[in-house]
Image (cartoon, grey):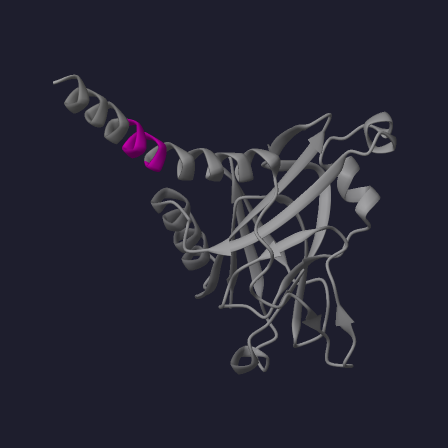
Amino acid sequence: MNKTRKWITYLAAAVLLTVIIPITAGASDSASGNAPAPTKPNVVQMSTGTKLNSTIPTYFYADTVKGLIVLSPEGMVKTAAGLTDAQIKGGASVYFSVTEGKTGPQAKQAVLTTAALNGRSLLALLDIQLTRTTAGKTTVVNRTQAPVVLTIGVPDQFQAWNNFQVISIADGNIEVLSDLDVDPRTVTVAATNFGALALVY
């Protein structure tokens, strides 16, 4: 009988570990602000052939656009993310991630409604996140204290359009942003919302 109880205890412990380990591993990745190594190329190429890379560490996993990078200098991004000079000198960091397919239904509906009101159609709906890490603590930054410049690579079949807008949503705040460049291969905006980001045409 004691042997049976021991086996039941071992089995229960094994099942519990099987459930807990993946959950805590995922939570650790999220809390540390570290994403897996990028599995999608994230270089935005201009019409001139110039290739642009993100100025801060970035994780990119999306298929509907040809890259999405941070163009503002890293120091400016850190300040916009709410880090002080002392924290920056102490080694504080920022991290940017881009994924798709995770936008909640309310944010998605807000994007579609805003696009329709502006006479636009949806091309891509992305989920962007900015985090700051200082003294071992990582915080998600939903809205920055100053605009951060982002550049999006336009899919080949839409490059002739060259009349894009970007809709960004975070914490119930909606921004409708105009393209700041004239290159048909790219869309550049200055955003303060980091949550749902839609490229519309």
Asked whether 17 falls inside the magenta stretch, the response is: yes
The residue segment tinted magenta is 13-18
Image quadrant where residue 24 sits: top left
Image coordinates of residue 95 in percent, x first then y, are 67, 44
Would you say 38 lies left or right of 44 here?
A: left
Image coordinates of residue 129 in percent, x first then y, are 58, 44
Image coordinates of residue 198 in percent, x first then y, are 51, 57
* Along the viewing direction, whichever of 20 and 131 lies nearer the viewer: 20
Image coordinates of residue 74 in percent, x first then y, are 80, 47
Q: Is residue 53 above or below residue 75?
A: below
Q: Residue extending furthest top?
A: 2
Would you say 160 lies left or right of 104 here?
A: right
Residue lying at 72% horizontally and 47% vertically, measured from the top left: 148
* Along the viewing direction, whichever of 191 and 66 lies nearer the viewer: 66
Identify the main secondary structure in magenta.
helix
The number of discs equals: 0
Would you say 172 lies left or right of 192 here?
A: left
Residue lying at 68% horizontally and 69% vertically, measured from the top left: 44
Would you say 104 lies left or right of 156 here?
A: left
Asked whether 143 falls inside the magenta stretch, the response is: no
Q: Quadrant of the N terminus?
A: top left
* Along the viewing direction, whichever of 49 and 12 lies nearer the viewer: 12
Residue lying at 88% horizontally and 32% vertically, measured from the top left: 89
* Along the viewing direction, whichever of 9 and 174 lies nearer the viewer: 9
Q: Is residue 176 above or below residue 39?
A: above
Residue lying at 41% horizontally and 35% vertically, measured from the top left: 21
